[in-house]
Image (cartoon, helix red, strand yellow):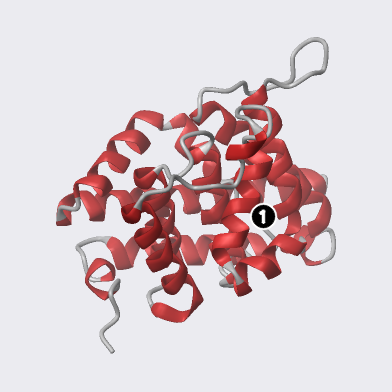
Amino acid sequence: MTDPLAPLAALPGVAEAADEARAALGRAHRHRANLRGWPANAAEAAVRAARASSVLDGGSLQLSESGTPDPVLAGALRVAEVLEGGAGTLVGVWQRAPLQAIARLHTLAAADLTDADHLGRPRADDEVSGRLALLAELVTGGTRVAAPVLAAVVHGELLTLAPFGTADGVVARAVSRLVTITSGLDPHGLGVPETYWMRQSGEYRGAARGFASGTPDGLAAWIITCCRGLTAGAEEALAIAQRSSGKA
């Protein structure tokens, strides 16, 4: 059978960007502070990822003076907790039933943003249902493209589709992390690509629009932007490791 994502992996610049991301994350995982002390560093990465993802969805970066996070940040932190370190139960659910995992992520992300009847329930729309089903097929063996490419496609598809109408960005970025964790690209979730996407939010949003356009140039730009985030996120993971080992 023809791999439906193979043409995307062959777009100009994509393979190089994916290879760079893979190499950078490999270096982060090989840092001596991550050989045994990775759980603490993964926890730090998870919090940073949640804060940046919150900002990208219009939420706060930090807790308020009262210590109470705004609804978007609260949801992003709950999502980060279940993904932290790549060892949560949701990782196993993702591998068996990805749509169930996506629904669970939305329930966590949007708990303070919408009523209970809408949590974890995509819009009742044939296009939404069909595209989510296709996404599930892709992540359960329907493609053999490199993990950075698959993570970018799933991320972009969920952003474009916005299946829930609330917290879709937080969910999309969390699913991207799930792909990098379960594929072995970033098994402990040490990278923080969300920080790059937050700092380069104009590039990120413009590239997302390019993905939604479906043009070759737009698709390539989005995948490369996602890979740049993974590479920069790996560099941040190294900085976290160096600080934890007392060599910052």
> What residue occupies the far bottom of the structure in this picture?
1
- Residue at label 1? 190
- Residue 92 vs residue 50, the one in the foreground: 92
Q: Residue at x 63, y 49 (%)?
A: 105
- In the image, residue 201 lies at what x, y percent? 40, 30
Examine the rendered structure and indicate whether residue 43 appears above or below residue 130: above
Q: Decide if residue 206 is on the left or right side of residue 236.
A: left
- Residue 156 vs residue 239, the one in the foreground: 156
Q: Residue at x 26, y 39 (%)?
A: 209
Neighbourhood count class around disc 1 (C-alpha, 10 Å): few under 14, some 14–19, many 20 upward: many
- In the image, residue 131 lies at what x, y percent? 35, 60
- In the image, residue 71 lies at what x, y percent? 66, 24
Q: Decide if residue 20 is on the left or right side of residue 112.
A: left
Q: Residue at x 54, y 37 (%)?
A: 195
Q: Residue at x 43, y 73 (%)?
A: 137
Q: Decide if residue 16 is on the left or right side of residue 107.
A: left
Examine the rendered structure and indicate whether residue 114 appears above or below residue 104: above
Screen quadrant of the N terminus: bottom left
- In the image, residue 91 lies at what x, y percent? 68, 65
The amino acid at mark 1 is: Leu
- Residue 125 vs residue 160, the one in the foreground: 125
